[in-house]
Image (cartoon, rainbow, N blue to C red):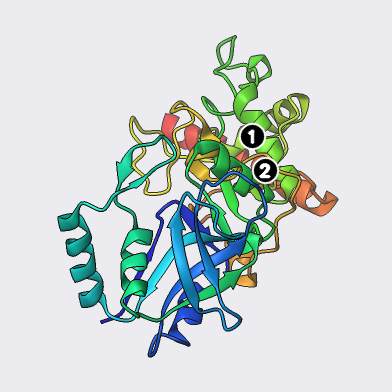
Amino acid sequence: MKSFTEDGDTFYTSDVVGQFRKIAATHNAVFCFHDTQPKPIYSYITMDDADNIKEVKEKVKISDWANTGCYCFRDGAELAKECEALIKRGETQLSQDQKGEFYTSGVIAAMISRGAPFKGIKLYRNDFHVLGTPTQVAEWCSSWPNQPKMRFLFDLHGTLLTAPQEEGDLRSCRAIERNVKLLRRLKAQGHHILIWTERPAERGAELLDALRRLGVEYNELHFGKPVADFYIDDRGVDPLLGDIDKQIGFYPTAVKVKEASPEIEAAKLRVGSAVARPKLSKEFLLGMTLGLCLGAIAGVAAKARLAK
């Protein structure tokens, strides 16, 4: 059985599995890239004109071909035996902090010395991305060119707006700037923004005015959210638990998102609620006003009948 190992903090945008499969019947492989900087922070290989690996060294710059951390073996059982033998021999190599550690490059060196065939498969530097630190993750997410258009649903009160400073007066609500800035950033990037509120549609005009005044931008506004003490949701993000960027994986960036598929774009939040949109047609406003008036009249009539 073949074995394919790679560093867990490295993300590949090249089909490394497919490339290894092409030679797996006859060769083991090491993925490498051209690295001209002088500091020996990787393991390095030398190759002949046919990309056969002749030598491998850990933290010793024997060439400008550095390993990406992806190692492939045509026989997993053979790899297991070689690892056990290396550990038994105690053959460690110095890490960057000068500590003796066991490295896969040591296993490969031992196999090459006994004639095992290894190919160096060359990648470009932008074919893989090291995500070992929070800074590296943020840098990758901010520069990732193929970001998909997503739908983000924000709760209104307690997430985007404070509770009214004056009881029942939505005009006295204040923006929770940290979350509103996130909403604006996602909207500017091209994502679809929805807002959900437990306020009834009858207070829609007042609410729309408050959102405009506070500069809250959105694509859809949904009324009638059920009131509960806990909301249990497999896609929920808690705005109070630290950095939201880390929770959703979308960091500040100038990259515009790509349009979602027609199926996703056409999807609507199916909660049986009224929907208001920021750019409303005259016909929609007239229809909404008429509907609210008829609802109010029906409510007064029902109350009068009950009073009798």
Q: Residue furthest bottom?
A: 25
Seen at 22% across and 60% down, the residue is 86
Q: Residue furthest top?
A: 166
Task: Give the CA separation, mark 1 to mark 2.
Answer: 6 Å
Q: Residue 95: x percent and y percent?
A: 39, 42
* Mark 2 burial class by Cα count in 10 Å: few <14, some 14-19, many 20+: many
Image quarter (top left, top right, bottom left or bottom right) of the N terminus: bottom left
Does dot 2 land on a helix, a strand or a loop? Answer: helix
**Is 19 drawn above or below residue 68 in the view shown?**
below
Amino acid residing under circle 2? Leu
Q: Nearer the viewer, residue 231 or 303?
A: 231
Q: Quadrant of residue 212?
A: top right
Seen at 70% across and 47% down, the residue is 219
**Residue 182 badge:** 1
**Is 268 drawn above or below residue 92 in the view shown?**
below
Amino acid residing under circle 1? Leu
Horizontally, residue 29 falls left or right of residue 301, namely left
**Is 275 drawn above or below residue 73 in the view shown?**
above
- Residue underneath mark 2: 186
> Do tag 1 and tag 2 residues touch (Cβ < 8 Å)?
yes
Q: Residue 305: x percent and y percent?
A: 46, 37
Q: Quadrant of residue 181?
A: top right
Q: Answer whether residue 308 is visible to the viewer in this image.
A: no
Q: Residue 297: x percent and y percent?
A: 61, 39
